[in-house]
Amino acid sequence: MGIYAELVGNVLASPMMKQVNTAGGTRRIVELRVMSASYRRLEDGTLEQRDGRTFPVDVTVWNERLTERVLQHIRTGASVVVRGDLYVSPWITRENEADAGAHIDAESISLNLVRIEQVVYRPRQPRDAGDQTQDGAPAPGSPDDDPADVARSEPERPQGDATGETSGAPEQPAGRRPRRASGSATR
């Protein structure tokens, strides 16, 4: 049984993707190094770094979905919270002395809000990937919908008939259909 740990610290170098051979085949992993942050609050309210408790920790991310997000969002200097299995890797130095380093196989990595200036949320996606609009096109925000296309799409403008007149209906955003009024409406 391993030690489950939570590490708070700063990323020393941007994450790097590697391919490793395992018994189950080739897997993509991400490796990064985080400097642990151990502080104590002094009587005057300031923080002081604890000597001997701040050291680098090697972090490996095996979950392929998480590796993509780590590569996308984590950079050198980011303050992160890493949770996962902690172990110590011993080795012998060139001077023939024993040494060791801490390592975490990360289950999760999140940004620590200490250095975050802005958060932008992606649009919520429906749970059922089979959601379709009435004309059979993917619903906006569905997994089949290309987010780049949604961002570039312009609202459809009503087209005038041969006389140049437009219908009295209000404009609808692209991809949406007007709701039918209750009762019978004639065109």
Image: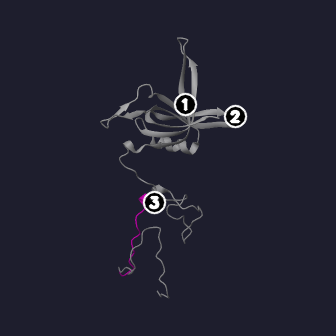
Residue 74: quadrant of the picture: top left
Residue on which the image places disc 3: 150
Q: Amino acid at mark 3?
A: Val
Q: Amino acid at mark 2?
A: Ala
Q: With respect to residue 13, does 69 lie above or below?
A: below
Residue 170: quadrant of the picture: bottom left
Give the CA distance from mark 1 to mark 2. 21 Å
The question of residue 157 being in magenta is answered with yes
Residue lying at the far front of the rendered structure: 43
State the SS at label 2. loop
Quarter of the figure with the N terminus:
top right
Colour convention: one colour
Q: With respect to residue 187, does 40 lie above or below?
A: above
What secondary structure is the stretch in magenta mostly built from?
loop
Residue 171: quadrant of the picture: bottom left
Q: Nearer the viewer, residue 154 or 46?
A: 46
Residue on which the image places disc 2: 23
The question of residue 80 being in magenta is answered with no
Tell me which label, 1 or 3, sits earlier in the chain: 1
State which mark lies toward you, 1 or 3: 1
Name the residue at 46% across, 55% down: 122
Tell me which label, 3 or 2, sits earlier in the chain: 2
Residue lying at the far left of the rendered structure: 44
Q: With respect to residue 158, does 106 lie above or below?
A: above
Residue on which the image places disc 1: 103
Tell me which label, 1 or 2, sits earlier in the chain: 2
Q: Nearer the viewer, residue 94 or 87?
A: 87
Q: Which residues are magenta?
A: 151-163
